[in-house]
Image (tube, grey):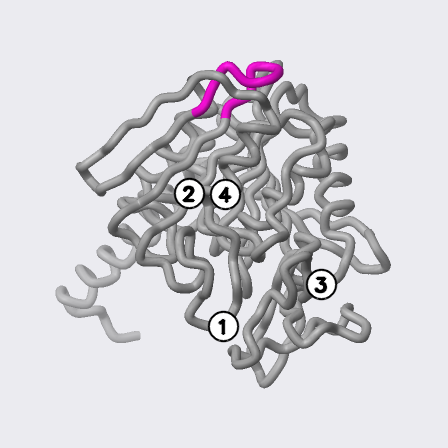
Amino acid sequence: MKKLTHDKQNMLKMIRALLAFLLFLYGCSSPVYDMEKRQMYHDASMRTFYVFEPSKIDKNMTLVVGLHGYTGSAKTFIRDGDANFNQFLDRKNFIGVFPEGKSFTDNRRVFSSWNDLVGSSGHGPKGDICASERNYYPYPPDCKNPHRCTWASCGDDIGFIEKVIDKLKTQYDVETVIVAGMSNGGMMAQAIGCTLGDKIDAVINIVGMQALGMSCIPTKPVSIVMYGAKNDTTVPPVDVLAADGYFYEPMGNTIETWKNRLNCTGSTTKKISNPSAVTVEHFFDCEENKTVTSILDHNNKHDWPKPYKWGIDLLFEPLLK
């Protein structure tokens, strides 16, 4: 066998060193990125959710339910990089659970969504939730005889998420449950706040205004943080008509009905100029110590408040005071 040249020997040493380093990183990987995939059978379907455990499991913990947006997944909600949502959970010592909406493939594209009881109906007290000319979205196969404006799943997603919460409560000592959702996930978070007030404490609705005339209010006191961005034309928080021809209830109307429902008597208004221009209206002294918070971003579009790491803290701050 021929002897290796000096250069080749050095190269092999470098490769071995690199492999050893990668193995070290893998063996010492942070729990921030570790999640357990779980499944359960519900509403005649096998449903998937992911569970994140923080570094320390204790008593009286907070459970955060994270709901992705339309066509998204658990991983798109969490994101990678320094704004990884699980880094926030680990820092706060919160448990995270990330259910996934039902999905189907149309024209080689995957569509996933949540049934917030609005997007699946297509018609409300103020008429159709879309204009005569609007973008076409494929009808989910679980919707039988869908309305022309229907775009979201028609399955029992509220029951699925309730079952997930109940399951996690049997495995951990959970004191507080917060449901946070982005876009269609935000619509779903609000719907859960309206219907599962005996199971959850607060919701965070991120750019997820519900359809015009169909923005729900809770049957039992539940805190809400609602975030909208002025330049959002996908789900506008101020203008009624979106760029795709769908109608949405202005954020101010929803906040007004929630604070009246919870009989809030105190309020503050705060303007933030850095790192983004944001107006925060906070209503307190409400029933059962709940709060109602409106966050209007004057710069952003259809997205989380940015920069993301700052934005996550901004959204949770009103609930963690």
- Residues in magenta, as a range: 283-291
Q: Are marks 4 and 1 in contact (CB under 8 Å)?
A: no
Which residue is denoted by mark 3 in the rendering? Answer: 121
Which residue is denoted by mark 2 in the rendering? Answer: 227
In the rendered structure, does residue 31 fall within the stretch colored magenta? no
Instruction: Name which residue type carries label 4.
Output: Asn
Element under label 2?
strand
Of the image marks 4 and 1, the number of the one nearer the N terminus: 1
Q: Give the crowd class for mark 1: few <14, some 14-19, many >=20 residues within 10 Å.
A: some
Which residue is denoted by mark 1 in the rendering? Answer: 245
Task: Select label 4 or label 1 by which is in front.
Answer: 4
Of the image marks 4 and 2, the number of the one nearer the N terminus: 2
User: Which residue is drawn at the image coordinates 50% and 54% (left, top)?
Assistant: 183
Instruction: Name which residue type carries label 3.
Output: Ser
User: Which residue is drawn at the image coordinates 46% and 40% (left, top)?
Assistant: 226
Of the image marks 3 and 1, the number of the one nearer the N terminus: 3
Which residue is denoted by mark 4 in the rendering? Answer: 253
| Image position, residue 7 (x, y; %) | 14, 66
Task: Select label 2 or label 1 by which is in front.
Answer: 1
Task: Select label 4 or label 3 by which is in front.
Answer: 4
Q: CA distance from mark 3 to mark 2?
A: 24 Å
Of the image marks 2 and 1, the number of the one nearer the N terminus: 2
Which quarter of the picture shows residue 222? top right
| Image position, residue 20 (x, y; %) | 34, 48
Q: Give the crowd class for mark 4: few <14, some 14-19, many >=20 residues within 10 Å.
A: few
